[in-house]
Image: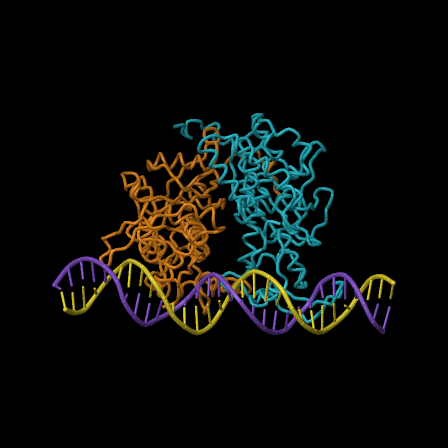
Chain colours: A cyan, B orange, C yellow, D purple
DNA sequence: CCACATATGCTCAGAGTAAGCACAACTATC
DNA sequence: GATAGTTGTGCTTACTCTGAGCATATGTGG
């Protein structure tokens, strides 16, 4: 076995990169804060920077510092997602650079607090994951492009590997009658990556990408630098799970809101529609919100009551959150 | 702001340590595989080793390699937990060593596959967390020692910090009528750490530990080296959560088992009793197991049917797992 | 035979959930 | 100012799940 002690000179060839998926919801659509690339040829990416062991007391503090430097934003809610250390997910490494180990974070903010600036832009989250938005029914990409290409990729393999690929596809994409699980975002992205169906796969592996895929970026989603789309996939999956048992949704809501605005925000992140009346009953029963007494008159219909988050729920219930299943059905 | 680029010489002063909480269940008690310390003065710890960027393709591969070297075990189920980078959780660092960044993993095995050896021992998980075992009612430590000391720690603070401490204690330890949430293992450990009630706190901070606490290790749980008890707390919390929505419990079960054995294993990890009849109904309804047709005669009572895990459930249900709430009540 | 342990089947009340009906209150438009 | 369209809000109904317990089956050791 190759022991670590055998090559002490290379042992320090590690850079820990801290990256943040900073999410918000505006105008009923989920947004991510993206740092503009240095030149037009490069791909965009998340706010990120290397961990500095002398300057940063904790990893999270390092992240906050970098985000503040690059976007001017002082983060509130921050949650660690995952640490990736795969070889060659960063082309710099092949050129002799240090091995990047990437710690991904999810942050939630109200978009109004930061405007798009010269450095950073808010972009629609589903631009990078078109297949994840089921609010208006099953996304067309799935049937037209993703499914056939995945099945072709499955058929490339022989023996037990073929069965394994089949199982993974069925489970992740809810085929053959299985349900679509809106939390399996990372599993789906990884499958597309392995099948060579996302642009990043070509950069990283040197393997041939499906021909015509470069032009088809609109279809398989916009590519990002390094492994940032993977971090984004992790973030979306985690957020979709967390909404159901922690009141994190209020991190992206304004101080007061109507119940329908709240529903739209959840639908935007969860990627599917909710039953309106049941949704209201649920938030009422859970004691998640309380009326402010004021009304909103910008509804376009009957004025709606304005609510605010009841912070006390955290002390009352073990797992407060919007537990409603997002109805995601084929067709 | 102190930029990372300002001190490039120190930037590489990072070691990524990979640590594994390897869990099993034997004789109805939860076990953790612990590496024996080099000398009797040192504290025991988890199997671990530094990440080697030249030799290890991924972080997880590095972990598997180290575990295999130190325990002879080839891991099956492995899951990443969390990456810690806090300053001064390792006394080596004060002595001028590199900044340790610690990536913790949870692994599940059947204990029968590895015996305790010269290098590693199986120890009871709750030896390190006596307050987490509610199978026989509320642990005595809580009322006799932990509660009063936590309240004293709360009263040390003034102003809003005092209220914050109060809220955290109530939430984590289910005081004042709040329910005990068996998943909040890490929150509880961190509170005890901050309050100076666990042995590790003294080593790390140089701050005074509560007098008499060194001798009271039996009460506040056995200490471990570095931040390994924190990793263990993370592992227990994650495992308790995961049991409920993924069939991970079968990773620690033998190929065939009785329903009561399965129940005991879950109770061991979840730290609380289950209602027997409802438990059976649940696993039957979920289709988690199927009868083998054979019977067990070592029950001490009526012979029980032997079951095996139905691997197909993974394809049938979105979130198969043992969803039964563990009844954890005061008294 | 007994007491005792575990296994297993079943009931029943209450809570929670999915789906939809009905109506209320506003805006925009003819 | 009638009408269509939009959104908000209350309520019903059938169904499923859950917690708790009763009752019985089939072994063990005395």
In percent of width and height, residue B208 lies at 41, 55
Does residue B152 show up?
no
Residue sitting nearer the eye, A154 or B321: A154
If the image is split into quadrants, where does the C terminus of chain B sit?
bottom left
In percent of width and height, residue A198 lies at 61, 35
Image-based side of A167 in relation to B210, left or right: right
Residue A47, located in which quarter of the rendered image?
A: top right
If the image is split into quadrants, where does the N terminus of chain B sit?
top right
Residue B188, located in which quarter of the rendered image?
A: bottom left
In percent of width and height, residue A327 lies at 59, 55
Image-based side of A204 in relation to B42, left or right: right
Does residue A48 show up?
yes
Instruction: Determine the residue positioned at 42% across, 59% down.
Output: B324
Instruction: Determine the residue positioned at 45% across, 69% down.
Output: B177
In percent of width and height, residue A146 lies at 60, 38
Q: Count the numbered circles shown.
A: 0
Residue sitting nearer the eye, A217 or B80: A217
Residue sitting nearer the eye, A169 or A26: A169
Q: Is residue A257 above or below residue A162?
A: below
Image-based side of A35 in relation to B286, left or right: right
Image-based side of B331 in relation to A130, left or right: left
Q: Is residue B244 above or below residue A121?
A: below
Residue sitting nearer the eye, B282 or A117: B282
Q: Is residue B45 above or below residue A161?
A: below
Residue A266, located in which quarter of the rendered image?
A: bottom right
């Amino acid at each position: 076995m190759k022991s670590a002690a055998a090559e002490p000179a290379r042992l320090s060839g590690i850079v820990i990169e801290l990256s943040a998926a900073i999410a918000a919801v505006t105008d009923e659509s989920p947004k991510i804060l993206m740092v503009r690339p240095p030149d037009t040829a490069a791909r965009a990416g998340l706010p990120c920077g290397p961990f500095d062991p002398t300057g940063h007391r904790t990893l999270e503090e390092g992240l906050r510092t970098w985000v503040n430097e690059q976007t001017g934003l002082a983060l509130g809610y921050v949650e660690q997602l995952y640490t990736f250390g795969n070889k060659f997910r960063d082309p710099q490494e092949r050129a002799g650079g240090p091995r990047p180990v990437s710690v991904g974070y999810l942050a939630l903010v109200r978009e109004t607090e930061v405007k798009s600036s010269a450095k950073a832009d808010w972009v629609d989250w589903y631009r990078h994951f078109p297949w994840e938005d089921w609010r208006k029914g099953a996304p067309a990409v799935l049937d037209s492009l993703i499914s056939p290409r995945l099945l072709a990729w499955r058929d490339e393999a022989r023996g037990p590997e073929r069965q394994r690929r089949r199982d993974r596809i069925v489970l992740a994409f809810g085929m053959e009658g299985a349900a679509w699980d809106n939390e399996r975002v990372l599993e789906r992205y990884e499958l597309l990556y392995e099948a060579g169906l996302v642009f990043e796969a070509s950069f990283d592996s040197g393997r041939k990408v499906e021909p015509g895929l470069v032009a088809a970026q609109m279809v398989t989603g916009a590519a990002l630098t390094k492994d940032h789309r993977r971090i984004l996939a992790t973030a979306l999956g985690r957020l979709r799970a967390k909404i159901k048992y922690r009141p994190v949704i209020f991190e992206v809501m304004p101080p007061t809101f109507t119940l329908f605005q709240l529903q739209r925000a959840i639908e935007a992140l969860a990627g599917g529609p909710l039953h309106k009346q049941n949704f209201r009953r649920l938030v009422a029963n859970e004691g998640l919100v309380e009326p402010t007494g004021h009304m909103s008159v910008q509804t376009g219909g009957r004025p709606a009551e304005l609510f605010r988050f009841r912070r006390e729920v955290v002390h009352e219930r073990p797992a407060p959150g919007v537990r409603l299943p997002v109805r995601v059905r084929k067709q």
